[in-house]
Amino acid sequence: MTAIRTDDLRKAYGDVAALAGLSLSIDSSELYGLLGPNGAGKTTAMELLTGQIVADAGSAEVLGVDPAADPLGVRERVGILPEKESPPSFSTPREYFQFVGAVRGMADDEVDERTERWAERLSFTEKLDTLSTDLSRGQQQKTMIAGAFLHEPEVVFIDEPLANLDPIVQERVKRFLTNYREAGNTVVVSTHNVDVAAELCSRVGIVNAGELVAEVEPSSLSADETLLDAFVANVDAGEEWDGDA
Amino acid sequence: MLREEWRLHSELLGGGRFGAFPLLIVALVAGAVWLLDFSGTDPGAVVAGMHALAFVFGLHTGSIGFVGRDAVANVLGDVTLIVFSARTLPLSQSRLLGIFVVKDVLYYAVLFLLPMAVGVAPAALAGAGVGLATIPLLWATLVTTFVLGIGLTIAGVGLSANGLPGRALLLGLVGGAVAAWYTGVPVVGYTPYGLYLDPGPESAGASAALILAAYAVGAATFDPQTQSADRSVGPAFRRWLARVGDPVAAKTLLDVRRSSGGVGKLLFSAAVLLGVTAGLVDLAADITGVAPSVGVSFGAVLGLTGFTTYNWLTTNDDVESYLAHPIDTAAVFHGKLRAFLLLGPAVGLAFYAVGVAWRGTPIAEAVVGAVVLVGVACYVFGLTIYLAGLSPNEFLFDTGLYAAFGAAIALPLVPILVVAFAFAPVSSTLLAALGTGGAVLGAVGFGLYRRSLGKWGAYHRA
């Protein structure tokens, strides 16, 4: 069953085309990677699919809902981990989860129970009552991850989920994402980290200059093929620099 | 930093609109000076008013001290890019803040205070009683008055952050200055305005000593890095949510309560306006020879606390920070409205009560003044959110917005102040009209708020 579909989605900021006709289809229970260089249009695609911004042209559906026509309807059913945002500076992680629960209409005891569970999973129980402005970037990222999954949505959009996390927590998050997909949910991961996409995703869409230029299933690559090869073959990397210091 | 500041605002707002700002100030000052001269106002009072304005402006700019650490870490880091990138350089936060203050002084000295001084020129040429030759001195004393304002605020913040002894010392110094002023000590003679009035080595030395003293106290006591590591607090969100019934409003009020300066920064802004109002009323009394209506004039001017309160309610977030949740722009604005209604009129009315108790006014004028205050505050809120959304500070840099805001504020405020200054004691008919006008202003404010929902909703999704 199709969970997410876009057809010729276009978005420009002034003269810059962030998306130049993105068409893709993501099934339920997929862990789909949007892989592309900086500025390829990955974040814009996520913002369009979650109704944060509207497209100039084209169409999209998430769980059968048009995010342009019913942005709140989409955001009620999905979870979002934005790349740029951090938890509110003067709220604690516990209060942030209470805020998330309040705007999503969750019961208090349900929020409290999931707060404790996520704090244990990501090892930040002792920081639950610390103002977010005093947390490290990694602890803030843990808070944002937990906030995106707190209501256990059917579809989750996550932008660079492993940024700022230590290796142990990275492994836990990877395992969780795989398990979450296997439980029947859809996860869309935006990243420019080829290794993360290859290890995590069931299917990877390579985005370049606002278009989907290739789709790869990492598990079906032969022994002498890598996702990096496919990425380099499809992406204009600009002038080559061999790493001279 | 200066180059970046210019590029930031000219890129953000369009070079022409930002570049025209000093010209707008020249035009506004020239018009005001001409009008006041035409109405027979003593040119000395005009110059005194300009110094008062520069001083208040400095106090306000200095209130960056209230948000020192938060600003560097959260607000300036995102907006003032050199400040942010300089954090990776071998510079202390104190030095960064110092550089930021110097940059602000240079910036405002050229773009705001120089046009203010130059704005006097047309009236001077027309023989209005202010000599052309005094304009360089006027600029110098306006700049140093501005510098004094910043220094006094930072010193005040520094002292108040040093426990009970610091606060006691601050209270003693402020009390001493007020007592000296009341008992006829020429306090003004020790300020840069004193230098303007009586140029010479003595007045220059006195004002320099005062400025140096303020900055010495500030340097010794102000520490933007002051904070306990990992501030832990008990969960309060649900308690506040139960009180206000809106998640965005509850979060906004928590932000104000917990960010540097706490609720005190709201009170400080209102206290500055109270001082300005008192000065304005005294000036008007001097000019007209008639005691103005304290109730109506204080109510009208203190209604402007609606702007400062709204400014503090929007410092810690933006619409984008809510878009990961099922919340749209209208819901964010609704939360801000609710937070404003809880804080804005209350802050204004508290200082209004102080002003009325201080200066005294007939009970009917006091009641109508309170109605006018609430109406003006709601009007200012609606106007600000309509013109600038959640970024009210844009007014400072966008010529078009500033002019539109200024005109829209002047439109209701000037007639109210004319009544307060020229028709005191105010007749019951005029009081009824003012009360009705206050209610209408409040309604217009809500109308503007409602119109802003569609406007800014479309803007943030574009």
Image (cartoon, coloured by chain):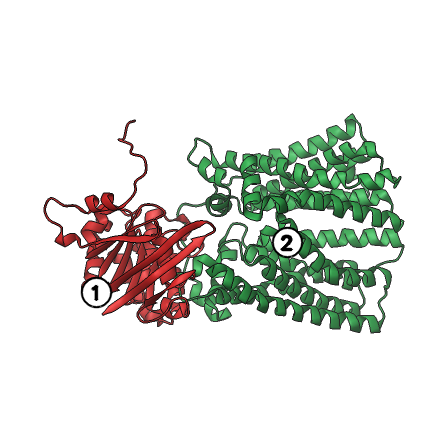
**Callout 2 crowding tier (Cα within 10 Å): few <14, some 14–19, many ≥20:** some
Quadrant of image for the N terminus of chain B: top right
- Circles 2 and 1: CB distance less than 8 Å? no
Q: Secondary structure at mark 1?
A: loop
Chain letter of disc 1 in the image: A
Label of residue B175 in the image: none
Q: Amino acid at mark 2?
A: Leu
Identify which residue is drawn at 24% across, 50% down: A169
Image chain in red: A
Image chain in green: B
Identify which residue is drawn at 43% across, 45% down: B228
What is the spatial separation of the Cα atoms under label 2 and label 1, in whole angstroms? 50 Å
> Which residue is labeled 2 in the image?
B401
In the picture, measured across the screen, residue B182 lies left or right of residue A225, that is right
- State the image quarter where residue B374 is shown: bottom right
Q: Nearer the viewer, residue B21 or B435?
A: B21
Identify which residue is drawn at 71% across, 62% down: B353
> Which residue is labeled 1 in the image?
A29
Reply above or below: A236 against A148.
Answer: above
- Measuring from the top left, give residue B2's x and y in whole percent: 57, 36
- State the image quarter where residue B453 is shown: bottom right
Res. B66 in view: yes
